[in-house]
Amino acid sequence: MIITDTHTHLYSEAFDEDRSDMIQRAIDAGISRFFIPAIDSEYTERMLQLKRDFPEHMFLMSGLHPTHVKENYKAELRHVEELLSKHTYCAIGEIGIDLYWDQSTLAIQEAAFRHQIHLAKQHKLPIVIHCRNAFDEVFNILEEEKGADLFGVFHCFTGTLAQAKQAISYNMKLGIGGVATFKNGKIDTFLNEIDLKHIVLETDSPYLAPTPYRGKRNESLYILKVLEKLSDIYECSEAEIATITTQNSKDIFSI
């Protein structure tokens, strides 16, 4: 059984004391494919080192995270473009709009999001979307950019059934993680109405640890709790969930 974590920040400082051991725990449990989203240029070398340390297991994305879209965002976008010319990346991500932390940067977040969508199309890569308190804003841009050359993952999906269907209409898989295990997560109440062909698994570690680890540091091993929850929701075996969601990740990332 091959399990894929489509979104994990394994380069995070939260893992500095036990990174290799933590990754090996996950690999030993059958979690053998890790997709690594970018934040900004400060984390580039950490990401590349992660790839050097675990070349068969790590697949890197390039991108500028919306919460890191600041006054220097154009320089950061040039850095993204430079990386795409030098290294192999599986996606442009994570990109999008976040209005939870700072609404004042909406205009430049939208500009950065559009620019990176165009980069993805240019390089024939999927996008991985971060959306927090910004469904309308993200959907407006996806509506403008939709087409056969736009596809990817709607990371950490926490919206409604209607929003799930709209995201899927833009050729997006739904990234499902620890929130599905929360008592107040809500998505567990309708997720079985979404065909498994639209779902990929993720942890977003070190964030959003699933129950019973909620509030603690998350790690890729805990994707097993997400797998267990989806097995209950869809009333099928964990092996079947793992097989389908891993195939979905292969369809998106071509890896």
Image (cartoon, rainbow, N blue to C red):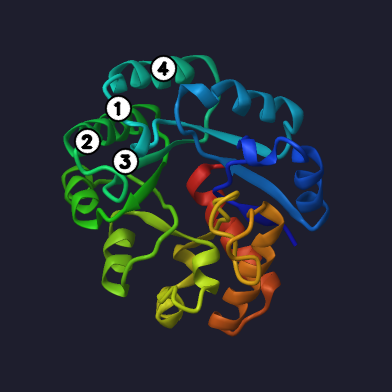
Looking at marks 4 and 1 on the same chain, the residue that comes earlier in the sequence is marked by: 1
The residue tagged 3 is 149
The residue tagged 2 is 105
User: Quick check: 119 above or below 154?
Assistant: above
Residue drawn where x is 28% and y is 66% of the image:
163
User: Quick check: 217 above or below 114?
Assistant: below
Which sits in the foreground, 33 or 96?
Answer: 96
The residue tagged 1 is 70
Looking at marks 3 and 4 on the same chain, the residue that comes earlier in the sequence is marked by: 4
* Gap in angstroms between the C-alphas marked 3 and 4: 23 Å
Image depth: mark 4 or mark 1 in front: 1
Which sits in the foreground, 218 or 196?
Answer: 218
The residue tagged 4 is 79
Q: Are marks 1 and 2 in contact (CB under 8 Å)?
A: yes
Looking at marks 3 and 1 on the same chain, the residue that comes earlier in the sequence is marked by: 1
Residue 129: image location, x then y, percent: 37, 47
* Gap in angstroms between the C-alphas marked 2 and 4: 20 Å
User: Quick check: 184 above or below 1?
Assistant: below
Q: Are marks 3 and 1 in contact (CB under 8 Å)?
A: no
Q: Are marks 4 and 1 in contact (CB under 8 Å)?
A: no
User: Quick check: 100 above or below 40?
Assistant: below
Which sits in the foreground, 154 or 183?
Answer: 183
